[in-house]
Image (cartoon, rainbow, N blue to C red):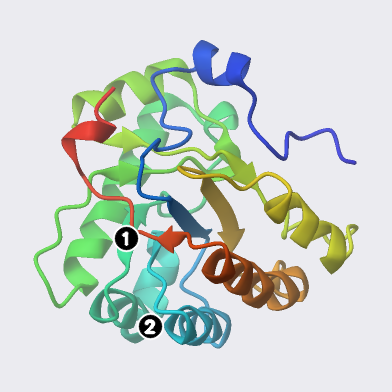
Amino acid sequence: MKLYWIKTNAFVKWIFSKYIWDIPNQEKLIYLTFDDGPTPEITEWTLIQLEKYKAKATFFCIGNNIKKYPDIFNKLINDGHAIGNHTYDHLNGWQTDTKTYLENINSCDKQIQESSNENLKIKIFRPPYGKIKAAQADQIKKWGYKIIMWDVLSADFDQTISPEDCLDNVLSNLKTGSIIVFHDSIKAFKNLEYTLPKTLDYINRKGFKCEIIRNNPELNQ
């Protein structure tokens, strides 16, 4: 097993309680999320899999990819999925000065507005790599963003693990309220292609429902 946490433990959630790691509920709702798109073919394939099971998801999009592929971006919206900000250039917050990082988030938001066929008010954000400085997070929250992390990491991006291990990362840790991370990217597709259909089938058989992450009051922290 790799050094990263597949399932975020209670201590980490307590230390970084300003972030949202899961969304507890009584309705067996879980939250599929996809980072780094939109990506030609892969995002479109992902949408087909979700539609087969009438599942909704939240896509944390990179601004530069939105600019390049606005049609795919708008298909996400038209299909009823939620959009989140993932910076314009997929920046690592730990390695980026706060001014530049915040400007990059704003650039992504502007691109969302310019590319969308709807008047979107996006106030959910996921830091690339899960790496963000306290000063960056504090300012983002002042802007009204909710910082969405995860409860279950599929590690589909890790090309050294097998698709079977990727699936086990998800199914062995999934529970009501879990926020699960996948990536609709070229790098992750080998594992995603195997894992996502089997995850959706498992979710369906176990009576869970996939819901989008909303800008709801219960997410305020």
Q: Position of residue 11 (x, y in %)?
A: 61, 14
Tell me the quarter of the image containing the N terminus: top right
Q: Is residue 61 visible?
A: no
Three-letter code, disc 2? Ile
User: Which amino acid, by three-letter code, is at mark 1?
Assistant: Ile
Q: Position of residue 129 (x, y in %)?
A: 60, 42
Dividing the picture into quadrants, the one containing residue 159 is bottom right
Side (left or right) of 2 relative to 139: right
Q: Residue at x 44, y 70 (%)?
A: 65
Q: Residue at x 61, y 74 (%)?
A: 201
Whole-percent x and y of residue 119? 9, 65
Toward which corner of the image does residue 116 lie, by quadrant? bottom left
Residue at image mark 1:
83
Dot 1 alpha-carbon crowd within 10 angstroms: few under 14, some 14 to 19, many 20 or more = many
Foreground: 171 or 122? 171
Give the side of residue 147 with respect to residue 191, left or right: left
Picture coordinates of residue 83, whole percent (x, y): 32, 60
Q: CA distance from mark 2 to mark 1?
A: 12 Å
| Looking at the image, residue 91 lies above or below residue 154 | above
* Residue drawn at 79 percent across, 55 percent down: 168
Q: Which mark is residue 72?
A: 2
The quarter of the picture where residue 17 lies is: top left
Please say if 90 is above or below 46: above
